[in-house]
Image (spheres, rainbow, N blue to C red):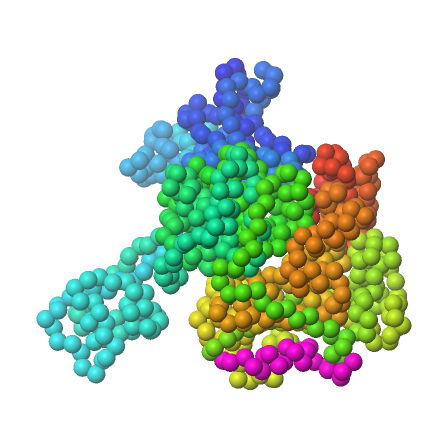
Amino acid sequence: MTPAPDGRRIARVAVEAQADRPERTFSYVLPSHVPTPHPGSLLLVPYGSRLALGYLLEVEEGPMGATPNDTLRSVEAVVSAPMLTADLLRLAEEVAVYYRAPIGTTIAAMLPPGLESRLERRWRILDGSALPSGLVGGADGTADDRTLRRHLGGRDRDARLERLRGAGAIRAEWTLRAPEVGSRRERTARRVNADRSLPRRAPRQAALLALLGQDEMDVPQLAGALGVSAASLRAPLLRLEERGLVALGWRTVARNPLSHRRPPEALPHQLAAEQEAALAALARLPPGGELQIDGVAASGKTDVYLAAIARQLKAGRSALLLVPEVSLVPQLADRMAAVGIGPMAVLHSGLSAGERHDEWWRILRGEARVVVGTRMAVFAPLPELGLLVLDEAHDGGYKSDRTPRYDARWAARRRADIVGARVLLGTATPEVTAIARARGGLAERVRLVERRVGAAPTVEVVDMRAELAAGNHSIFSAQLEERLAALHSGDAQAVLLINRRGAATFILCRDCGDPVRCPECDLPFVYHLAGDQLRCHHCGRSAALPSSCPTCGSRRIRHFGAGTQRVEAELRARFPRLRIGRLDSDALAARRGFEAVYDDFRDGRLDVLVGTQLAAKGLDLPSVTLAAVIAADVTLNLPDYLAPERTFQLLAQVAGRAGRGPAPGHLVVQTYAPTHYAVRAAARLDIDGFADEELLRRRLLGYPPYSVLARLLVADPDRGRGEARGRAAAEAAALPGIEVLGPLPAYVPRRAGRWRLQVLLRAPDVQMRAAALERVPAGVAIDVDPESLL
């Protein structure tokens, strides 16, 4: 322990550890030999019995409110220059308080992963005479940790090391090692002995020599020119090297997540009058202001984003463009490159550790003025940030599902307010809470109603009850089969969507189309195989599985659901001439898996794309003339108050995939509930009409925006103990004015050997909710403003 004398330098540090309150930080003394680091630097500090990575928030002279008798431990080392900008440090503290997440964990989530595992210690030699004989330091006067330990030898080398340090013979110095993946190297080839004859009966070797000429080329370039894989060139190049015709070498290249993308063609960038009006509305916003652009499909929202970003760059500021899914990054990056916007960096979870590390430092050094990425990119360390754009702003992918459970839309608004930037949120299907924000004067709103290409598709809602009555037991209606049969391979394409979620399923009457609902909450019951019973995941009510429909008395009542694999299999069986691809979570499992499927579909190597909600986003392809939703009831009957809104958004988004070219588009919606207000509004593409009805329903039921929610999550291997912890959390949060529901089993009640329970809190405002959340016991996960109650 180090005494705390007057005039000392005190570092306020965030450490990734559990604390009694989320904003809790720790104070350390900076040793006299350590220059004062800047906020945002990475420090190594003692925490308990170990050394931990800390994040410097500020340095002050004096005891920071401590008394002269207090003792503080010393900072072990400064291991990195600042990795966070001042605005990000302030934002981290706000995120920690609002989302009840430890600030150390919050900052760690902002930074590239694996930093602590890359700490490396060297020893500064202060008194060489005290060291073992034969140990010689490097030219910089240091020795690496492994060398010093080897010379000390014996079982007591750790104790001897500490004695040397205590005697002042050595001092530890820590650095942050480069990513384990190392720099990427590419094989190069250069022609030598040009006067030597070409090999006979070796056309591949001859082609390589002809390409090389007098210039050095890397193997990927040679492979691209020959239209073959780089791996196939290894043997012929080695053979040429043996013959003395080629010199092989290596070239170190920066990892570039976009280097594999095909260079896009330059695109014209002329804006229509309503797009110019949207840009003018953005320019009129005060610093920290928010503009919502609600644009129909193909109305040119992306063109507005790009023009707004270009104006920021021209003014010397930087810009951030967020998308909810990794799958949308390549397309937007291609569009930006096509209009000459750059230099650009990308940040998303699909990057390797090395790529994220490289991109982060490129951004921090100012080498990239535009960042495209998923929700994590809201924390990109861009200097002079002027604009934050969120595409598909309605999407739940902007909400994190792990601590810190932040919403990138909230974080973008707060960051814009901190730095004086502007926020632009674009979507074809805004959330009803966003519409309420605009109606309440918290944001400006503009509409783009004219399609720049193509025309609005015709929408056909198919009543699957009538199909069943006509004897059609297939998952394809007669109307959809007819249109698929008329699809000409290589000329037109189709997108088919089936959005199956979760392990549980709902119970649906195939005559009247009604699901079996909880009488208390008006949400669909969920069928649980365990116990063969129905359960409401909102209030906990249970019911026996009915033998007939409670609404119409029909006995044709059954579990409902079909997945993408079944749809793909039936398509192949019925339409063998069509080339079919599938886009779901399996496609994202492989590195750049989405890009492979997307590129095949874009380049016409697939006729039909079957997918989950991934297929409803951002496929802006003029050859798609047919879109279909196989079962709208899947999202409509989820046990979640957001189910009608999710259904409306999904149907409207899918409609936007068709009719973007010269050929007319058509949308087929198959449903057992054709009269539901969400389905009817989606068929008319009536955003405000749906919002009016949905906001009325939420006002009556007390859901956001007329209340605020929080979800408490407990996971425990022991079911009884988990239930007890859930009850304790519910009782602790039960303040006057707070409605507490639960504990109840989560939508997926058991995962990875742990029983999962949830408690729902409903409060009239943010302040009352915050007071209740302060009382939640440690070890209970808190989800503020949950994106879903499932």
Q: Quadrant of residue 364?
A: top left
Q: Nearer the viewer, residue 373 or 703?
A: 703
Residue 614 in sight here: no
Residue 641 sits above or below residue 785 on the image: below
Residue 276 in sight here: yes
Q: Nearer the viewer, residue 635 or 305?
A: 305
Residue 474 is inside the magenta segment: yes
At 43% from the left and 57% from the top, the residue drawn is: 335
At 56% from the left and 41% from the top, the residue drawn is: 290
Residue 168 is inside the magenta segment: no
Q: Quadrant of residue 316?
A: top left
Q: Position of residue 87 (x, y in %)?
A: 51, 34
Residue 215 as seen in the image, left or right of residue 366:
left
For the C terminus, the image quarter is bottom right
- Which range of residues does the magenta coloring cover? 469-489
Count of residue discs = 0
Q: Nearer the viewer, residue 626 or 501?
A: 626
Q: Position of residue 572 (x, y in %)?
A: 58, 81
